[in-house]
Image (tube, rainbow, N blue to C red):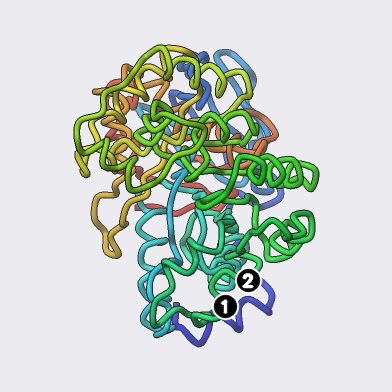
Amino acid sequence: MKRKSLILLLTGVMACSSWSLAQQKRGLLLKDATIVDGDAFMKPRKGSLLIKDGVIAGVFIGNDQLPKEVDSVVDCKGKYITPGLIDGHVHLATGDLSDRKKAMDGIEKVLANMLRHGITTVRDMAGDAVTLAAYKRASEWQQIPAPAIFYAAQFAGPSYFEMVKRPGDINGNALLGATPWYCSITDTTNIELAIAAAKGAGVSGIKVYADLSAAQILAITKAAHAQGIQVWSHAAVFPAKPSAVAKAGVNSMSHSNDLIFEQLAGDTIEIGNAWEQVYKGLKADWAKQDKLLLEMKANGTFLDATVFHAENNKMVNAVLITARAHQLGVKIVAGTDWIYPEENAPVPLLDELLVLAKKCGMSNSEVLQSVTLNNARVTGLQDRGAVKKGLRADLLLIDGDPLKDLSFLFSPSLVMKAGKIYKY
């Protein structure tokens, strides 16, 4: 898309060309596929799907009678249908945005490559909300090839924002920490008002990031949930320990490796000393880790493991803790927190899934759930992540069984997002 056209599209009416066959009166039939659901307890089954008005209007299994009149039929014999994939941890708008044309060109290429590889939704874990809101709307209106975008406001203490200020920030140094989406929290902050402002900026969640106390995390979580907003936290918020984050009842905790900081002495932790202990070879104390993980399980807190990120940074505890979390029944979500290529190139979400499968004791069906149903739920979405009647038609048509080889997920012949078809 040309740069100057994006703003015009955001205020206009969706072009007729963006409507697909699936949105015509009688619908589109995806016929005779093997359906592999996002729910790991659902066994694969042979069947057909009727897609109408952007949703799954019917699921027909076995001898169920198929609709006699439809607008179009796609023969899916020998192929597999799965839910669209969701990356639960991306950052689309945290880079240098001072050159808007260059930045937007890069973002659009990344989004297009995500969709090409089967990613139909992303959870953005904090960035420039002005940019993210524009692309969220363009994606919703099917004006550009892009996943659906849900994004967070970053809440942190003032010392964090002072530390990360740098020349070239799109909002200027004076505003970093002073916007609804980059919000500095102090003991005198009106938390309810700060969350309402973030909600007004279009966020779906609050990212609890750094330099916050246990009491502040609890207050943010309670206020956000009261306003219908998710809370997505780092596992260690410094000086708050992971147990304080888990007890607050946040929706997800990011970075399995950081759960190791729970083992450090004292009620609070200091970031320099914490990482020094890791570099010295701090090993998991499973009595302490199990207590923390069971607290997360009891509160329904998802673990945003980011194990591929950890493996690339030699954080050896990440896969061990993720494997133990899975054994104890903590729900895992698949997110990369990694750089995505701008061109048609492999995406890091496959790498994340392969680490979960090969090193964390998860079956391919459980991994598929982590990247579909679990990611939908942690984002606060009930309308996607599975193949069921009434859910949004975010679907992949792939050539091989993903329960045997996860890589099939990332080379779909057809991607459907809200009923619109993209063929590759």
Badge 1 density bin: few <14, some 14–19, many ≥20, Cα 10 Å: some
Q: Is residue 66 above or below residue 26?
A: above
- The residues tagged by marks 2 and 1 sit, at their Cα atoms, a distance apart of 6 Å
**Label 1 near label 2: C-beta < 8 Å?**
yes
- Local SS, label 1: helix
Depth check: give the residue in front, 141 or 59: 141
Residue at 36% from the left image edge and 81% from the top image edge: 102
Q: Position of residue 200 (x, y in %)?
A: 74, 64
Q: Is residue 408 above or below residue 136?
A: above
Residue at 62% from the left image edge and 69% from the top image edge: 16
Q: Is residue 186 above or below residue 207?
A: below
Q: Is residue 174 left or right of residue 283?
A: right
Disc 1: which residue:
175
Residue 376 location, quadrant = top right
Disc 2: which residue:
179
Depth check: give the residue in front, 258 or 119: 258
